[in-house]
Image (tube, helix red, strand yellow):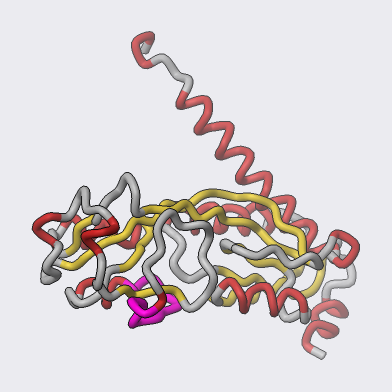
Amino acid sequence: MNDFGIQVRHLDRKLVGTLSIGLIGHVSTEKNLRIARAIARFRQRDEAVRFVLFARTPGNLESQLLNGQLQLAVGYFANRVPALQYVPLFVERQLAYCGREHPLFARAGNLSPDELAGCEWAWRSYLLPAVRWVPVPSLMTAVTDDMEATAVLVLSGRHLGYLPDHVAAPYLAAGLIAALNPGLLRYDADFYVATRSQACIDEVTQAFLEDLLTEESTLSALQSALGNLDVSEM
């Protein structure tokens, strides 16, 4: 009824309705700004759209896309659902850490998997992308679906855990955690924007998807230009 009321009040607008977007709750400030800029770009259109944003786990995002509760979601998805389409956006690096009170803290930096035998881990409640080294299930004695919750467990000194660079940064700067082995105990999470199949996408969702991908392309081109800039000529 609310959507119908919006449409009646804005019959002269090209895009009218509600756009429900699902996000992973621990994305870096830089990545969130990309999404924010896409919203700003969309608001320049001839539209009367109400945005509804949710923070969910990857599995919940896909389920809610399938049942129509969400029109679009940004996250990393280890398993691809055939009924959904996925477009790559960016990559997030995650490393394994220990807290300052952990027995391995003083030797952190180049620890081997053998040296981690018997250590307890804080693990994700959802499927992760390919990880080079995974502890045996019996060592996964804490489970979370949130990066800040994982950080708390690592800070306790009782659990090891993987954290994104941007979540770990302030704790690293304060000397509260240390990376176990950045060359080995790491993985990259590929973030995608997911929607239902092209035939099921409405005009509002399609327009926002175009703006999001345009924002990503513009940023990629800028980063490429800056990377190729010869500062010796400046």
Q: Is residue 141 magenta?
A: yes
165 and 117: which is toward the camera: 117
At which x and y percent is residue 111? Answer: 22, 53
Q: Is residue 138 left or right of residue 203?
A: left
The quarter holding residue 70 reads bottom right
Q: Nearer the viewer, residue 199 or 116?
A: 116
Q: On screen, 8 above or below 94?
A: below
Q: Which residues are magenta?
A: 138-150
Give x and y (percent) for residue 86: 71, 57
Question: Could you tell me which quadrant the N terminus lies in?
Answer: bottom right
The residue lying toward the viewer, choosing from 187 and 50, is 187
Is residue 134 shown in magenta?
no
Q: Is residue 1 visible?
A: yes
Query: Looking at the rendering, which quadrant does residue 164 occupy?
Result: bottom left
Lateral position of residue 119 relative to residue 35, left or right? left
- Residue 101 horizontal side relative to residue 194, left or right: left
From the top left corner, tell me how far across and down residue 151 is, in percent.
29, 71
Which residue is depicted at the point 57% across and 69% down?
23
Q: Which residue is rendered at x = 74% and y = 67% of the image?
A: 81
Q: Is residue 136 left or right of residue 169?
A: right
Q: Residue furthest bottom?
A: 1
Q: Residue at x 34, y 75 (%)?
A: 122
Q: Quadrant of residue 85?
A: bottom right
